Amino acid sequence: MKRILTIQDISCVGKCSVTAALPILSAMGVETTILPTALLSSHTAFSEFTFLDLTAYMPSITAQWQQQGITFDAIYTGYLGSVEQIAVVEDIITRFRTPETLIFVDPVMGDAGRLYSGMSSDFPQHMKRLCRCADVIVPNMTEAAHLLEIPYIEKDYDDAYIRDILHRLSAIGADMVILTGVSFAQSEVGFMGFDAAREQYFSYFHKRFPQQFHGTGDVFASTCVGGLLRGMSLEQAARLAEDFTLESIRETAQAEDARWYGVHYEAAFPYLFRRLFPGF
Ligand code: PXL
């Protein structure tokens, strides 16, 4: 069984980060080790939340793992709580990386053109440094704009513009890039990808869902890295991730208690299993 280390926060309420990554990766048959970066009462889209920074504990936890000889097939980073924490995560990657380790960085920073609440304006430049040591990065359009220090454009861009962004994102350091939330027409949204080693671009679009839900980026990233660890190509893994995220959104929209702070991925697991396990 493949083993992954995921480094992101625990938000007690609001399904995102670890509370999305752990169940999804486990369901995909990937043994998942967590390294919590912070403990929040809820994610930061709530009007108020508590925030316990765990940066100081992270080095002693990982030192213990090293002493026990624990290794990982992949390291997947998500929401990080501070600039200082990014340096700690870089150090962890350096210490645990082998030539075979897949480094998957979701540069979680913002959405709809804005950085998430509490993120400092210099955060993107530090996140860019972390992206340098990744094999795969999966920014959304907002995060891509911040990483490249270009204006965020909401619409009316074309295929050539996105290809250029993908190219510039991969020039930061990662061979494989998936850019999410790409939309060439109001009714459609999806992702475009670039595999630099093969010089291949690919894309996948579907009908836009009228509602927006929180935590979908984490569902997408977790499923995508899970697919890669199951031996899928980047394009296959990203398509599966997009489909599973959409299915989770559909389940949420249909639920009587549809919540805005996380999608009901639990109800979409049978769909994921049908895609992953023939005969399920
Ligand atoms: O889903 C991204 C995310 C993860 N973790 C925390 C967040 C957010 C987005 O707002 O606040 C704590």
Image: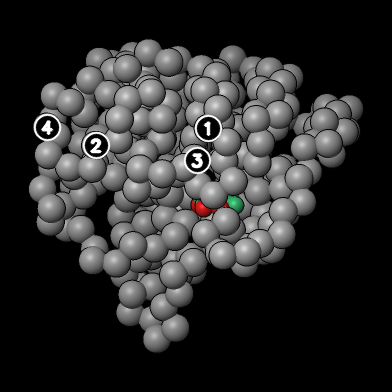
Residue 85 falls left or right of residue 58: left
Q: Position of residue 82 (x, y in %)?
A: 66, 36
Residue at image position (44%, 70%) is: 260
Task: Give the mark, 4 or 3, whose residue is nearer the N terminus.
Answer: 3
- Please identify the quarter of the rendering in which residue 68 is found: top right
The amino acid beneath tag 4 is Asp
- Quadrant where the image shows the N terminus: top right
- For mark 4, what is the residue? 158
- For mark 2, what is the residue? 153
- For mark 1, what is the residue? 121
**Contact (Cβ within 8 Å) of mark 2 with mark 4:** no
Q: Report the mark closest to the observer, 4 or 1.
A: 1
Disc 4 packing (10 Å; few <14; some 14–19; many ≥20): few
Task: Give the mark, 1 or 2, whose residue is nearer the N terminus.
Answer: 1
Task: Give the mark, 3 or 2, whose residue is nearer the N terminus.
Answer: 3
Disc 2 packing (10 Å; few <14; some 14–19; many ≥20): few
- For mark 3, what is the residue? 108
